[in-house]
Amino acid sequence: MVAKHTAALDRQGDAINRTIIEITKIILDLKRLLDSRDVCLVSEYISRTEEFRTLPAQFQVTSPTFTPQEINKKQIQQQIGPLSELVITYPARTLLDEPRILTYIGTWPDELHSVSCLSDSELWTRSTDNILRLYSLQRKLLRSVQTKSGNVPCDIAVTRSGDLIYTDDRDRTINLVTDTKIQTMIRLQAWRPLNLCRTSSGDLLTIMTSDDGKQTKVMRYSGSTEKQCIQWDNRGKPLYTSSGFSLSYKFLSENRNLDICVADSDACAVVVVSAAGKLRFRYTGPPSTIQKSFKPVGVTTDSQGNILTSDSINHRIHIIDQEGQFLRFIHNCVKFPYGLCVDSRDNLFVAEYDRTEVKKNPVLPVNTP
């Protein structure tokens, strides 16, 4: 029971801790504001009280109950009663009828590829230069970091402790950015790390391609230690496409039920496998007509287990449930969507490749029913 539900409890704890850190920071800012004599600074202040009136999405835990039985001296083995199962239930939440833009952040020097939430008010971004940038929702550049090698990074992710991780396919490394330095966590031989994501348990998942471009796999790491390799289906065939010598980026994300979701644009599918690496399904688009073929790029998941993937060619985002059933499109407010991420309140951040800007869209209601 503990192993089954630790991931859900960890996610809830992370969301609450991030909220506490953010509230503490706001309180310190308000104290400085009270002591300020800067009229412009005070007049620009906007209260964020409404954002914190509710905790992040809640779930209920039903503890096991013990049912005793009368002791029968003749049947000693039956004197202990049964223990019920531990049950975690999530309140039902529905998709918004009409997703809308809450804010946008821009611009970058070139095409925008990746976004990763540090908190509900700060996010890291990756473009086509060698600079990683941290922005606030007020469009303020908070920090910029140049890659250790000077190469353009492939992808970014944020650890549970709030540090940044990025992949460098040219020197075959996965690197950790802390407050003071950049540390190489993993250096590979004959394989190039591409896209990556953090799991609910704190592990790292990364897509890799062989130097000859003929093989692609997902690797799981705990720190720098290899824990799992996912490459073949039960028939011995590749789960993911390979593109020869040309790199083909494949965004990936872990779902609430611990499934691993990979947006494989070359296969025109989102490939979903279980935590054990067994193929569950391939989503190849809804049973409806689209002007151009479905080529998923970015992928992320929300608190309900829904999978969101960006269809950049058709300027839309597909939302499917954790069983692969199509739910709806977001197409009224995005253009060339690329990288995606979701914050603890199920707000969706979309990196728009052509416009070099990030949009924040609420996909689910902020407050639980």
Image (cartoon, rainbow, N blue to C red):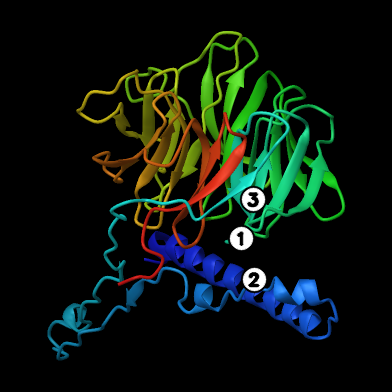
Are the residues flagged by discs 2 and 1 in contact, CB closer than 8 Å? Answer: yes
Mark 2 or mark 1: whose residue is earlier in sequence = 2
Rendered position, 81 above or below 212: below
Q: Quadrant of residue 133?
A: top right
Q: Amino acid at mark 1?
A: Ser
Please name the residue that numbered disc 1 is placed on.
119
Mark 1 or mark 3: whose residue is earlier in sequence = 1
Q: Is residue 110 visible?
A: yes
Are the residues flagged by discs 2 and 3 in contact, CB closer than 8 Å? Answer: no
Residue depicted at 20% across the width and 87% down the height: 68
Where residue 48 sits in the image (x, y, percent)?
58, 74
Where residue 298 sits in the image (x, y, percent)?
49, 35
| Direction from residue 158 to residue 279 in the image, left or right | left
Seen from the viewer's position, the closer of residues 216 and 140 is 140
Q: Secondary structure at mark 2?
A: helix
Please name the residue that numbered disc 2 is placed on.
22
Q: Quadrant of residue 292?
A: top left
Residue 158's tag is 3
Instruction: Judge the density around disc 3: few (<14), some (14-19), many (≥20) Cα neighbours within 10 Å.
Output: many
